[in-house]
């Protein structure tokens, strides 16, 4: 996994990331300068480019931290632990009513007692700048060793690692 990534590898990894995020849209989101734990958030996005949106709480430490920094990091673990990603970018408050309406659902509404007019509701806009993606893929022998408790070796695990601007 230490070979330099090709453009094709990068495109494939980005496609795999966006597909995985569509399937399981949960990220851990935090502000590194805040020196606090990241928070689980549900990603809202339209397409594979542009911002990632999150419904948040005005009273959360994440939103309170935005008064001193906008540098944010998001971590992702795909279903089955076959894809991992770390994304850096800028996190800002953007309470655009059109965006709030666009992604609003019964699930989101359950978090806000007063619905879209809840004073604690805040829309967070995450503009990704860079992403690092790791894809793991066990070889057939690796899968057998894993199933039967065998000792795993580096050749039993295949995968890709890319880092790119978004």
Image (cartoon, grey):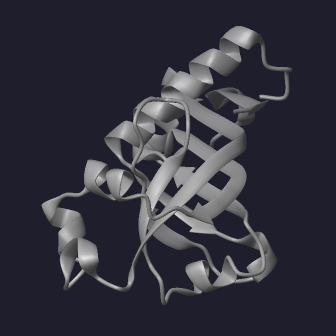
| 101 in relation to 8, above or below | below
Image point (67%, 76%), residue name: 66
State the residue lying farthest toward the front.
97
- Compare residues 165 and 53 and report the one nearer the observer: 53
Number of numbered discs on residues: 0
Q: Quadrant of residue 70?
A: bottom right
Compared with 142, 84 (above or below) is below
For the C terminus, the image quarter is top right
Q: Is residue 42 left or right of residue 68?
A: left
- Image quadrant for the N terminus? top right
- Whether residue 148 is visible, yes or no, is no
Residue 120: percent from the left, percent from the top? 38, 85
Task: Identify which residue is drawn at 35% across, 59% down.
Answer: 97
State the image quarter where residue 147 is shown.
Answer: top left
Name the residue nearer the viewer: 158 or 30: 30
Residue furthest bottom in the image: 59
Query: Is 34 on the left or on the right of 147, as rendered?
Result: right
Residue 121 x %, y %: 37, 77
Q: Is residue 51 above or below residue 121?
A: above
Query: Picture coordinates of residue 31 (x, y %)?
Result: 70, 71
Q: Residue at x 34, y 51 (%)?
A: 98
Instruction: Please indicate, yes or no, whether residue 106 appears anywhere in the rendered image.
Output: yes
* Rendering coords of residue 83 (x, y %): 54, 39
Out of 33 and 146, give the one closest to the viewer: 33
């Amino acid at each position: 996994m230490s070979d330099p990534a090709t453009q094709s590898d990068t495109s494939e990894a980005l496609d795999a990331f966006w597909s995985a995020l569509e399937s399981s849209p949960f990220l851990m989101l935090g502000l590194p300068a805040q020196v606090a734990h990241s928070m689980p958030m549900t990603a809202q996005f339209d397409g594979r480019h542009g911002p990632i949106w999150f419904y948040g709480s005005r009273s959360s430490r994440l939103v309170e931290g935005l008064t001193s920094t906008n540098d944010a990091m998001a971590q992702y673990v795909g279903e089955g632990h076959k894809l991992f990603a770390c994304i850096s970018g800028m996190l800002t408050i953007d309470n655009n009513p059109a965006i709030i309406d666009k992604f609003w659902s019964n699930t989101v509404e359950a978090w806000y007692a007063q619905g879209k007019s809840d004073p604690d509701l805040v829309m967070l806009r995450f503009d990704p700048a860079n992403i690092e993606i790791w894809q793991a893929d066990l070889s057939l022998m690796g899968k057998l060793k894993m199933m039967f408790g065998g000792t795993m070796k580096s050749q039993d695990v295949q995968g890709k690692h890319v880092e790119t601007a978004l």
